[in-house]
Image (cartoon, rainbow, N blue to C red):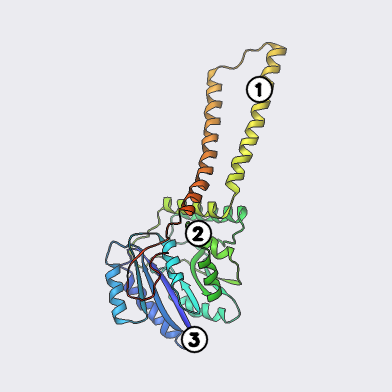
């Protein structure tokens, strides 16, 4: 049996040697269960990540590196790895040691019980900023209520999958990818393996609060039409309220002769309604922009350099 380990890399010069050492030790421990190939996807790193990957490829024939022509993002890196994975099993894991390779033996053991996928989830967020942790918990609650994607709180991209699930994920070729949602949407029998949060072994996180917020919006738009429904119902509700207010003003004027309220209240109403209209237009614009990008059919990634033949370089 062959297992493909997919590792997206972006400016991981400091942690890469440590990660590779841990990875090879785990692979040696599992050598009786499976052979391994390591696919490192260099996502346009600006440090010495690519140089280190070339050095690893020279001394270890199991190492394949796919180097993007520029930074396409982690989602594109994971997609490239899955698309070029040749194993019966495939696993995605980060190079920052927050996805400990030491969990792989337990994941293999669970897979032998008949599961199609073993996915990991963090049961704590020790070491994370409080604002980020709060935002993450709120995101998982919201998306599970408004979409049909099964996303567990604390879910990581670190998971071990059978070939059938890998093929199903790759077949979903949408440009704006949200893999956590895709993994849940395709189904398959999944076991969630809990573990305590592990901080980065070296270097700095590439995810700021705003980049995570943007990624969360991507996930909601990709897997739910609830924002469009909210915009529609807001328009209907405000139209009804406006009609009642007009009726109230007309009746009060006819019956009591009261003057109409002054311009401050009118200005507030106009600003409020204008803001709601712009919000609704913005929501519709987000969906339209996603449709526009899908229709253009641009590739998810472009591989500028690799040490492997028969690689899908543009997809």
User: Toward the viewer: 290 or 90?
Assistant: 290
Q: Which of pointers 1 and 2 indicates the residue nearer the eye?
A: 2
How far across and down, in percent of the image, does residue 190 sit? 59, 71
Q: Which residue is painted at 52% across and 47% down in the image?
A: 287
Instruction: Locate the C terminus by quadrant.
Output: bottom left
Q: Are marks 3 and 2 in contact (CB under 8 Å)?
A: no
How far across and down, in percent of the image, does residue 248 sit? 69, 21
Q: Are marks 1 and 3 in contact (CB under 8 Å)?
A: no
Residue 130 seen anywhere in this rendered image of the structure? no
**Helix, strand or loop at mark 3:** loop
Q: Which residue is painted at 39% across and 72% down in the image?
A: 311
User: Toward the viewer: 136 or 179?
Assistant: 179
Q: Residue furthest top?
A: 257
Q: Residue furthest front?
A: 296
Distance from disc 1 to disc 3, alpha carbons, whole Å, reads: 75 Å
**Helix, strand or loop at mark 2:** loop
Instruction: Bin the neighbour count of mark 3 within 10 Å (Cα to Cα): few under 14, some 14-19, many 20 and up.
Output: some
Does residue 34 lie above or below 75 as drawn?
A: below
**Helix, strand or loop at mark 1:** helix
Sequence-first disc among 1 and 2: 2
Residue 33 seen anywhere in this rendered image of the structure? yes
| Label number found at residue 174 | 2
Sequence-first disc among 3 and 2: 3
How far across and down, in percent of the image, does residue 133 sit? 48, 56
Quick check: 130 left or right of 228?
Answer: left
Distance from disc 3 to disc 2, alpha carbons, whole Å, reads: 34 Å
| Label number found at residue 33 | 3
Sequence-first disc among 1 and 3: 3
| Label number found at residue 246 | 1
Does residue 277 lie above or below 103 as drawn?
A: above
């Amino acid at each position: 049996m062959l297992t493909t380990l997919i590792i997206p890399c972006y400016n991981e010069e400091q942690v890469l040697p440590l990660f590779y050492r841990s990875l090879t030790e785990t692979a040696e421990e599992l050598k009786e269960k499976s052979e391994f190939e390591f696919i490192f996807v260099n996502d346009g790193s600006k440090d010495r990540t690519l140089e280190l990957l070339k050095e690893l490829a020279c001394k270890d024939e199991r190492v394949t590196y796919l180097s993007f022509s520029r930074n396409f993002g982690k989602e594109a890196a994971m997609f490239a790895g899955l698309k070029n994975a040749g194993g019966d099993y495939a696993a995605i894991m980060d190079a920052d040691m927050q996805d400990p390779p030491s969990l792989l033996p337990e994941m293999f053991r669970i897979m032998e019980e008949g599961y199609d996928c073993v996915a990991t989830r963090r049961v704590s967020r020790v070491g994370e900023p409080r604002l980020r942790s709060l935002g993450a918990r709120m995101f998982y609650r919201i998306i599970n209520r408004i979409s049909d994607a099964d996303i567990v709180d604390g879910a990581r991209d670190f998971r071990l999958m059978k070939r059938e699930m890998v093929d199903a994920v790759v077949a979903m070729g949408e440009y704006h990818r949200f893999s956590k949602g895709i993994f849940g949407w395709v189904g398959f029998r999944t076991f969630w393996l809990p573990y305590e949060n592990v901080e980065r072994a070296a270097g700095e996180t590439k995810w700021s609060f705003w980049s995570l917020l943007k990624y969360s919006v991507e996930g909601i738009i990709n897997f739910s039409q609830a924002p469009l429904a909210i915009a529609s119902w807001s328009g209907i509700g405000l139209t009804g309220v406006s009609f009642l207010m007009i009726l109230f003003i007309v009746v009060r004027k006819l019956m009591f002769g009261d003057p109409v309220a002054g311009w401050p209240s009118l200005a507030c109403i106009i600003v409020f309604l204008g803001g709601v209209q712009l919000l609704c237009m913005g929501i519709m614009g987000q969906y339209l922009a996603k449709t526009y990008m899908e229709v253009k059919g641009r590739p998810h990634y472009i591989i500028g350099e690799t040490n492997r033949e028969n690689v899908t370089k543009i997809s």
